[in-house]
Amino acid sequence: MYILRQDRLEMKSRVRRALILAVLGGLLLAMVSAATAAPETVSIGPGATHTRIHRPEGPWAINVVEADLAQDFLRLKSLVGIGEMADGALMIGRQTVGEMMAAHAGEGARGQDRPATAASRRPVAGVNGDFFALAGQYYATTALGLQIEDGELITLPDPARSVLYLLRDGTLHMGRFRATSWLRGPRNLLYEVAAINRSPGYADLVVFTPPFGDQTWAEEETTQFALVGLSGPLRPNVEVTGRIASIAVAQSQRIPPDGAVLAARGVAAYALRRLEVGEEVRLCVKMEPEIGDILEAVGGGPRLVRDGVMSVEHLKERFSDQFASRRHPRTGAGIRGNTLVMVTVDGRQRRYSQGMTLPEFAELFLELGCTDAMNLDGGGSTTMVVRDTVVNSPSSGAPRAVANALGLFSTAPAGPPEHLAIEPTEVAVLSGNRVMLYATGLDAYYGPVPVPREDLEWKCASALGGVDETGMFTAAEVSTPTTGLVMARCGDLTAASVVRVVPAPAQLVVSPSDVTLAPGEVQQFFVYAYDAESQAVRLPMGAVAWSCEPPEAAGLIDASGLLRAPSTPCRIKVTAGVGEVKGEATVVVTTGPKALEDFEQEGEWSYRASPSEVPGSVEWRQDPLRPGNHCLCLKYDFSTQVGTRTAYMDLNLTLPETNTVSLRVLGDGKGGWLRARLRDGFGRVFTVDLADRVNWSGEWRLLTVALPEGIDAPVTLESVYMAEYHAGRKPAGQIFVDDISAGRGAEEEERVEAGAAQPSGGAEDR
């Protein structure tokens, strides 16, 4: 595809010019198949283009942004999401890609060789970045791998995972890094730093820097050292010094704008116990290999293309075969010379775009001429923004808030309009319905320049429809699909949008397609419309008629697709209709959660621990309280080790569509911390708390936990485990686990009723 690119672009340009001339000559209804057969490519910034590709063989809806970073006015930035705590303090959090792009616009390019004025930095395009965990209260959205912004370390690398990075000399690269970090202080103090801007474990020393936010948050018994007068930002392979301004044992500590905070727990706090206010300490992060001065970096994985050859390295980077072989929405980045290629492939939208396997994704990057490529976070996170518009179709119906992103910005000076553009550039609409078209000017560097609405003239063929002076297009009543151009003129500038008017959609897809509900629970359904060529068709508000069968269930769903399950178990067919075209979904209403494992048959369950020397076992046993019943017994002994100790019951149980997991636990009253470890379809690990303290014994208790928001199906319950991090506590005991089940919790119902629901269920709609 790359070899033919220039010829194709020239052909498209000739066709477009011919069509515009034809329209201006009065032939406003033009067959544009010649123009739409090739991918739609438009310039979006200095040296940057955006291409839309639809391949029916997938089907695949693909968006590609290509950016020549050798251009003087084009900047690549690693973006960090920002959130707000309950007290109003800002800290690392989740934002959509569009929100991050908007937040960084107009800042001026810190750390660049050619700084820009604040007014000149304008968003060009961006995609979501690294994987992130969602467990934990305040550190839930920190990226899992390396992130560097303007040369400053935000997080340390995962040595197994790939990184896309930009050197200060302007060259792009991919690689893997290993970091060792140290704190040095008086009296020969030398202690390893476990992480930057991440939650400290029991024996950890962690550094928090100003990019993390206004303040830290830590567990109890955390000693926090505030440093001021730091000699510079924390950068790879550069030692910095600072002076201790305060020492406190607290959950929260303000991060000095010119400093950092050292958070130490357990053994780490003991090692730093002799530090005093006013003393100087030094911090250094040694990163290998040393490859130069890294300006921007974002982690992800796995590697897809290496040195021009497909190399899907998912096992080396700790991703499962299932993650690689299943089709999912994908986001990735590739390198062609000094051109960055950012790609999204939509998925989980049948008939429109199914998503890709990793080998298919790698092949796409090879077709785009990339010598190196890597995968980024995908699934519900997959998002591409061009300027201020989301150009792909996120699988959950709306962009997900994510931890970080890759953003392209233009620092070119603004100028007068030299081009005209219409958004959307291509759209399908039903007969008789309306869609708003927006025209804007573009300067010589393709930066948006407003044009007065009163100076715009709109035209289209009457056989296609009509367009008023505001850009509102009303489709004609047609009996067969009709494609043409809607034109806009401003002085000597013209632009066109390809509009396809269809009498009816060829297919409706209801999402989720299958769902299990509890009596009285609510579920929001969504509908996607496609024409005969699998192109998405816009549906206006109120165009869809929702209904339910059997007849007595008819009143359970409203005009927006919100269903309330009846009070008794039953099976319901949900139907969405536009004229004679229908789409269907199945709802099973059942009392109680779905049983997943009752341990009545012996299976392959195993024990492991951290440290590995922690004694323990997992045994299939008779229930001590219920004769004839079987369960699993987890034995553990935390008395022989120090620091954080964990004893795992490995289950590797695949969960169905659900947002809660329940299990029964017979406790031992020893006060241990009971947790569960989950892994989602994208290889991300999540931990959830089942019980802060196992302080009961002699009885079975039902424990229910909600799955973290944003976890992508399929989800695996990898293990249930006991943990202890208090140095003075050394319990030894045993707990019993039984009746693992999946269901949907009450908080989901409340969230839907509040109007904040995203489609829930299985892989089809996450």
Image (tube, rainbow, N blue to C red):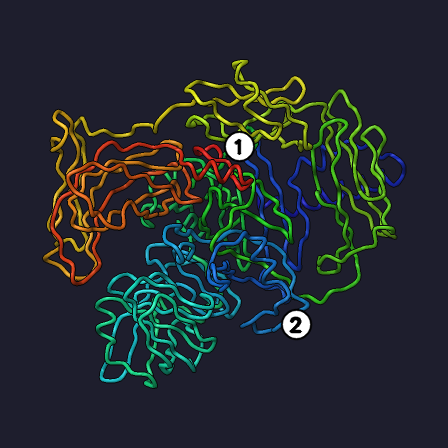
Image height of 226 relative to 412, above or below? below
Label 1 packing within 10 angstroms: few (<14), some (14-19), many (20+): many
Helix or strand or loop: what does disc 2 sit on? loop
Estimate the x, y position of residue 108 in percent, counting from the top left. 61, 70
Q: Is residue 241 left or right of residue 17?
A: left
Q: How far apart are labels 2 and 1 at the CA level?
A: 46 Å
In front: label 2 or label 1: 1
Q: Nearer the viewer, residue 250 or 17?
A: 250
Helix or strand or loop: what does disc 1 sit on? strand
In the rendered image, which quarter contains the N terminus?
top right
Residue 588, picture quadrant: top left
Kind of residue indicated by mark 1: Gln
Q: Is residue 687 left or right of residue 481?
A: left
Estimate the x, y position of residue 342 in percent, counting from the top left. 54, 51
Q: Nearer the viewer, residue 590 or 535?
A: 590
Numbered circles on residues, count: 2
**Residue in view at x 15 percent, y 39 percent:** 698
**Residue in view at x 24 percent, y 77 percent:** 273
**Residue in view at x 55 percent, y 62 percent:** 76
Estimate the x, y position of residue 731 in percent, counting from the top left. 13, 53
Q: Residue furthest top?
A: 551
Q: Earlier in the sequence, mark 2 or mark 1?
A: 2
Estimate the x, y position of residue 729 in percent, counting from the top left. 16, 59
Kind of residue indicated by mark 2: Thr
Q: Which mark is residue 117?
A: 2
From the image, tell me which residue sits under label 1: 524
Q: Is residue 188 left or right of residue 285?
A: left
Image height of 582 relative to 678, above or below? above
Q: Which mark is residue 482?
A: none
Image height of 554 relative to 625, above or below? above
